[in-house]
RNA sequence: UGACCCAUGGUGUAAUUGGCAACACGUUAGAUUUUGGUUCUAAAGAGUCCAGGUUCGAGCCCUGGUGGGUCAACCA
């Protein structure tokens, strides 16, 4: 690339999402005193997944880029679904991604008092009322999207009565489901959310933070926008399905605001990935039904699952950056995510030798008992990562797939009469092999080596078509390797209605290889340490295996051009 | 028979706001390579859902269609 091109490429500005355009316009117009404050508002009812990462990158990223702040706020308005366990995992995952809320850790439950006061204020203004009807009746009175609703008989209840009933609801004098507080908006609105939405319901389960102080809890619509307002949020970024909630969001803000300040809700498209399912509820089912081995199962799209699988925060952020934010309901190809992780791992991981499916090669003319340490470059992409010594001897393991008795065309590896280089060591030639007559399985391969072809040596320039990775048999470290395929074999299990996603579960999604051999240097590898097993893919050391062996999770395979040739 | 939102190569996004449709992934071919990886080079692939309109000029603005999505939890 010429200097000019390089400069041009570097200078070409990254495209700016429509959201960022809105933000820049607002800032320019001096809205909200020219400040930007965002928030990331998870409900603590599950683990964060890569879809949340998309939101996190936007919420924290926009604030960071435009000199603002981003709060962490737990949307904990429904005690029956929420648990403290999730709060800790959420915080850990956000930090892992590399974002920080700088101590601004808030909870919707912090505002229960203010929210309650505001509800009473609405009642006094004739904008809210207690409805004594059961859920199904209220629901049917709402009509349907093409037919207006009808008003509740309690809609015009006197203010004092409303005030008293609501106060008694709060104290727990009534049963769950017996009464609700509704905003008095417009039963004929074409927008269902404006048809006197329920804003408070009676729940008697204790809340993980406020205990049994409250017997009434605000609904999402009555908590979210107001919480934004209380925190001084300027841009409330959420996913597309909340678009129809925006008029109601604005309606409450209108009742609440006392100055020019007002938060603005902007919606963007949710992340969908092929062969992946992102519904928290269904992910929870997978965990509970033991379809996977926990929230951090490396096949899960959760951040802890991806982390355990070997994904880096950088690769996830890069991916999010690549897919962008729009209002189109897109389905993103997992291959783009895999590209992002390969791109990152290629630069940062040391290359090592590991053999997943060992086949013993005996080098007949190499002195038994002799050991040479051959020098290998840890990472050709980054020479600062140095070199290491790997022991070589007369018996080595190679990949079973790297030998074929009858090789097809363009097979560049070992076969009778063929020569290959053992990377970093010698060129060897196959002179014979041992085959089990009953099973037809090749059990050993016999070779000779050419002493002059040692890497860096006299005839090291000699070319052969294939270069194999290997592990000295006597020095090899036993290891277990877990290969993960996609969890679903359907491109879009997320699009399936109800619980259909189960029938797309891929029974082949986990393969455990227990006879693997890896080079001795790996004996000291630490949990979550990442490597590229030469010619095999990127691997990550697992952290809590039940196996006594070293366990590796395969993050992702290398791009495999051979299988394409083979087809 | 409603309201709101959306529509650009196979996929995801761009298009200086009305000026020759670009980038990434993927695909194909070639070069390099002691990883069939990486890197590099090239190619194929959309004329922007449809029909009108405004304009010298429309992916972008207007009108009308078509297709898809969201909304009728005391979930968020």
Image (cartoon, coloured by chain):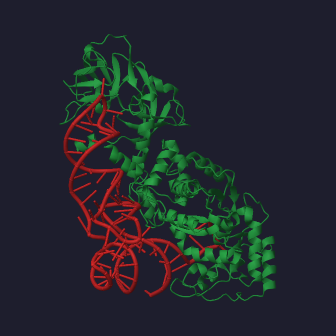
Identified at 49% across, 34% down, the residue is A551
Instruction: State the residue at coordinates (47%, 54%).
Output: A320
Query: Number of numbered discs present?
Result: 0
Q: Where is the C terminus of chain A found, in terms of image quarters?
A: top left
Q: Name which quarter of the figure residue A183 lies in.
A: bottom right
**Would you identify the image quadrant in which residue B32 lies?**
top left
- Residue A59, percent across and down? 57, 58
Q: Can residue A476 be seen in this view?
A: no
Left or right: A449, with A10 as reference point: left
Chain red in the figure, letter: B
Q: In this rendering, is residue A402 above or below A102? A: above
Nearest the camera: A534 or A563? A534
Residue A468 % position (x, y): 31, 28
> Which residue is rendered at x = 66% and y = 59% of the image?
A74
Residue A157 lies in quadrant: bottom right
Vertical position of residue A173 compared to residue A156: above or below: above
Q: Where's residue A174, x and y in %? A: 77, 75
Q: In this view, does A9 lie above or below B54?
A: above
Measured from the top left, where is residue A434 in percent x and y?
A: 26, 23
The colour assigned to chain A within the rendered structure: green
In the image, is residue A348 above or below residue A293?
Answer: above
- Residue A335 in view of the camera: yes
């Amino acid at each position: 690339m010429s200097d000019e091109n390089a400069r041009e490429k570097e200078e070409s500005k990254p495209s700016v999402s429509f959201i960022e355009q809105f933000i820049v316009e607002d800032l320019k117009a001096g809205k909200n005193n020219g400040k930007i404050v965002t928030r990331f508002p998870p409900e603590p009812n599950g683990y964060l997944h890569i879809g949340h990462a998309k939101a996190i990158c936007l919420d924290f990223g926009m604030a960071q880029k435009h000199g603002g702040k981003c709060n962490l706020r737990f949307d904990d308005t429904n005690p029956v679904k929420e648990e403290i366990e999730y709060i800790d995992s959420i915080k850990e995952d956000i930090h892992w991604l590399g974002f920080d809320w700088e101590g601004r850790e808030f909870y919707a439950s912090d505002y229960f008092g203010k929210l309650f006061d505001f509800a009473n204020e609405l009642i006094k203004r004739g904008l809210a009322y207690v409805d004594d009807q059961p859920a199904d009746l209220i629901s049917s009175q709402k009509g349907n999207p093409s037919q207006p609703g009808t008003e509740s008989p309690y809609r015009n209840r006197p203010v004092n009565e409303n005030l008293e009933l609501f106060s008694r609801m709060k104290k727990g004098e009534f049963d769950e489901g017996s009464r609700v507080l509704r905003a008095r908006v417009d039963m004929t609105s074409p927008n269902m959310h404006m048809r006197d939405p329920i804003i408070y319901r009676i729940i008697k389960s204790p809340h993980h933070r406020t205990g049994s102080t409250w017997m009434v809890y605000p609904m999402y619509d009555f908590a979210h926008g107001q919480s934004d307002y209380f925190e001084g949020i300027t841009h409330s970024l959420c996913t597309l399905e909340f678009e129809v909630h925006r008029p109601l969001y604005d309606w409450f803000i209108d009742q609440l605001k006392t100055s020019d300040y007002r938060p603005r809700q902007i919606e963007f498209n949710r992340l969908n990935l092929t062969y992946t399912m992102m519904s928290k509820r269904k992910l929870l089912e997978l965990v509970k039904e033991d379809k996977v081995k926990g929230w951090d199962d490396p096949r899960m799209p959760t951040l802890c699952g991806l982390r355990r699988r070997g994904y880096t925060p950088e690769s996830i952020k890069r991916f999010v950056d690549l897919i962008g934010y729009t209002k189109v309901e897109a389905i993103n190809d997992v291959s783009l995510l895999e590209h992002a992780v390969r791109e990152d791992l290629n630069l940062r991981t040391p290359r090592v030798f590991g053999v997943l499916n060992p086949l013993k090669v005996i080098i007949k003319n190499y002195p038994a008992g002799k050991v040479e340490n051959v020098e290998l470059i840890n990472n050709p992409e980054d020479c600062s990562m140095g070199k290491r010594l790997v022991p070589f001897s007369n018996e080595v393991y190679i990949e079973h797939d790297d030998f074929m008795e009858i090789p097809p065309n363009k097979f560049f590896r070992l076969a009778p009469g063929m020569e290959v280089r053992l990377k970093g060591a010698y060129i060897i030639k196959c002179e014979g092999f041992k085959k089990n007559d009953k099973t037809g399985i090749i059990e050993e391969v016999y070779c000779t080596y050419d002493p002059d072809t040692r890497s860096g040596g006299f005839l090291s320039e000699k070319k052969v078509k294939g270069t194999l990775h290997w592990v000295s048999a006597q020095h090899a470290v036993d290891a277990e390797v877990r290969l993960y395929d996609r969890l679903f074999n359907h491109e879009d299990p997320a699009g399936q209605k109800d619980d259909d996603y189960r029938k797309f579960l891929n029974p082949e999604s986990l393969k455990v290889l227990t006879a693997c051999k890896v080079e001795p240097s790996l004996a000291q590898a630490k949990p979550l340490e990442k490597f590229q097993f030469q010619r095999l893919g990127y691997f990550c050391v697992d952290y809590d295996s039940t196996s006594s062996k070293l366990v590796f999770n395969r993050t992702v395979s290398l791009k495999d051009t051979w299988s394409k040739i083979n087809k």
